[in-house]
Amino acid sequence: MKKIVVLSGAGISAESGISTFRDANGLWENHLIEDVASPEGFNSNPELVMEFYNLRRRQLRDVVPNEAHLILAELQDNYDVHIITQNVDDLHERAGSKKVLHLHGELKKVRPVNDPYTIYPWEDDLHTGDTDRHNVQLRPHIVWFGEAVPEMENAIQIAQAADIFIVIGTSMQVYPAAGLIQYVPGNCIRYVIDPNLSNTYTKEEHFFKTSATDGMKLLKERLISKK
């Protein structure tokens, strides 16, 4: 079974109604990035940072996977599909995708401030005073600016084994995630779906300057017809 590797970004979640970080009306609007997405910001004002992510966690209850998420899950019937996502929501999983790697963490998980590898599921709001069993304060399980990306090596290994590589809904400006496309094999077929990107990543016939949903509808027909 051929392996599809997907690199997904905020554009696919935006179609479900999740605000994106980099849009003019996105969640950064009322906060400096360093205030809500850096270790320094958390150390300076942990309540502000935790409430910022509490609001996003609550929003997840009101949104559902869109058709692009669902099509990616459907492709598992014909391909070995691995999704590497920059998104911190759980929409890929809720759509039915089984192999999802989150590069930048997950909203519905937390970890102790002193241990990036001990991770707990978390559904509710997080506040100062919420601690682990060792009485260590918990923080959002989010990779903030200036922090290492622990899953990057795993993502590289997945990309290196791709037969088909799909880029969907990402600006390709956030590194190291954007560099993953450089690791795919030379004979790997690359597809890019994004209404805002210029095509510097693949053959013209493999480039869909469309929304995530419209692009996945077109790509589904192409991929299934080749089976």
Image (tube, rainbow, N blue to C red):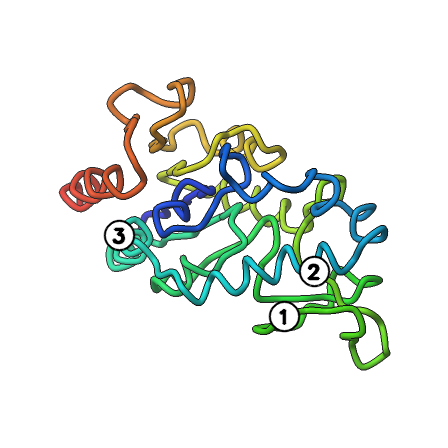
Tell me which numbered mark, 3 or 2, is placed earlier along the sequence: 2
* Of labels 3 and 1, the one closer to you: 1
Image vertical order of residue 222 relative to residue 39, above or below: above
Q: Nearer the viewer, residue 61 or 192?
A: 61
* Of labels 3 and 2, the one closer to you: 2
Q: Which residue is mark 1?
A: 125
Residue type at numbered disc 3: Glu
Asked whether residue 165 appears in the rendered view, the answer is: no
Tell me which numbered mark, 3 or 1, is placed earlier along the sequence: 3
Q: Are marks 2 and 1 in contact (CB under 8 Å)?
A: yes
Image vertical order of residue 172 relative to residue 18, above or below: above
Question: In this image, 219 relative to 8: left or right?
Answer: left
Q: Which residue is mark 2?
A: 50
Q: Nearer the viewer, residue 131 or 121?
A: 131
Q: Which residue is mark 3?
A: 67
Judge the density around disc 2: few (<14), some (14-19), many (≥20) Cα neighbours within 10 Å.
many
